[in-house]
Amino acid sequence: MHPFVPHMLALQGGAPNLARFLSELRYTSGRKAWREWNWKGYDALPMLPRVRIGKVVAFPKTWRATPALRQAAGDPSAWHEAVLRWRDASHVDRRVGVVDQDRVYVLDLDDAFHREILRRDLLKGGITLMEGPGMGEEDFGWLQGRSNEIVVPLRGRARTDDPRPPHPPAVIEPVHHGLGGDWAYVRLYADLDTHDELIARHLPQVIREMADLADQWFFIRFNDPEPHIRLRLHSADARTTGRMHERLHENLRALIRKGLLRRVSAESYEPETERYGGPEALSLAERIFCVDSQVAVNQIRLLNRGQALGVAANTVLVAGYASLLEALGVEWTTWAAERFMKSRDGAVGRDQIDEVCRIVTAKDVARSVTESLPALDLVRAWGDNAAARGYGESISRDPSRFSEKQQNYAISSLLHMQHNRLVGVNPENEERSLILLGHAARRLRHR
């Protein structure tokens, strides 16, 4: 038994949670919901063409109000001329359907009263203009001129293939490094405003003091329960692991005495083994974390000098994203272009995309960036990084063990950590930087 919704009302907009839950139960057994035509990021264009599949219109011709038209809506005296210019530039039909969620009404743009209705609704926001059946007066003649809607339930054909995966998903055992083990893990608490200085200036001094005892280290920033830095170091030799822990805490106590840290806590390290593809892949990911931490220290130092680089922080981020993706063996322009949507609110401007594309190329990214910005030295970090190359091969070797979806999630996690180290916990800026990456990828892919 499956719930049936006998109408086309948009439940996600105003239906009670229970009604939405019941309507979605039918998709829990492997059935997929039919969804409207998806323009994959191009739906923000001012005009979209009609899409026809056989006798079915999958998507009607659609117009969106331009910024100039929205601005003119605030001035009734300029409205008529603005509508004429917009109709001429965008080839807008005389009769259009105004869509507000699941409500549609028809306007005649030659009629002054109808234009005024459009102006007022445009000021409210949230509307789209489209063509559709019933734009002509005679189109509803069979129902005495009344508009109508028919809901036809459809049932899919039985599947001929076996939907079950060929192999059960692999069970990845969690890894735990206890206190005093081969991984040292400490949380460093200090005022948030001092974190960049702590990372760029004082953390490298601590690492230099540990050079003969630790062969890997990396850091991340965290906000729970309060902003702090998480530092992890790996013992170079099991025989000197105890000495590594002792010396680390000696150095951190010195920072506390200088007032650079408020407090330090030692923790057990439980890596996200499943997230990164299992124990073998995790060891390679940790080597990537180590390189990325060194890159971040250098970049924070450069960015904090103001105009030392001459480019924005998000440009540096995108250069790092693209360099890492290429080091993993990923066709980075294709991968990023397909995953990150276009900017719809103007947060990512053309000048930002231009700046990125002046220093980033579709191929040999680290070298092109280093030629433009030698101080970043991304060639040494990612130009021929065996750990990154090995990690890319490891997670893609057996899709039955680590699916393509999991691979993409793991790669996205590496980019997330790059942003975390350089900028910190800032989801809004992280989204903008990834949108910028997608824009640059689409432009460079077609050069």
Image: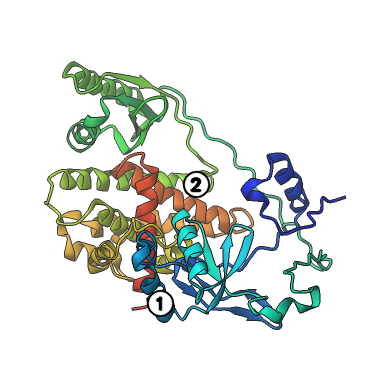
Q: What residue type is labelled 2?
A: Tyr
> Can residue 130 be spotted in the picture?
yes
The image's mark for residue 205 is none
Residue 427: x %, y % from top left: 40, 44
Label 1: which residue? Answer: 84
Mark 1 residue crowding within 10 angstroms, few (<14) / some (14–19) / many (20+): few
In this rendering, would 186 be left or right of 155? left
Q: Which image quarter holds the C terminus? A: bottom left
Decide: few, some or many residues near mark 2? Use Cα within 10 Å; few <14, some 14-19, many ≥20: many
User: In the figure, is residue 281 to the left or right of 74?
Assistant: right
337 and 347: which one is in front? 347
> Of marks 1 and 2, which one's residue comes earlier in the chain?
1
Quarter-wise, where is residue 445 in the image? Answer: bottom left
Residue at 44% in and 71% down: 46
- Which kind of residue does numbered mark 1 sit on? Leu
Between residues 243 and 272, which one lies in front from this camera angle? Answer: 272
User: Cα distance, mark 1 to mark 2?
Assistant: 56 Å
Label 2 sits on residue: 276
Instruction: Work out whether 108 lies above or below 179.
Output: below
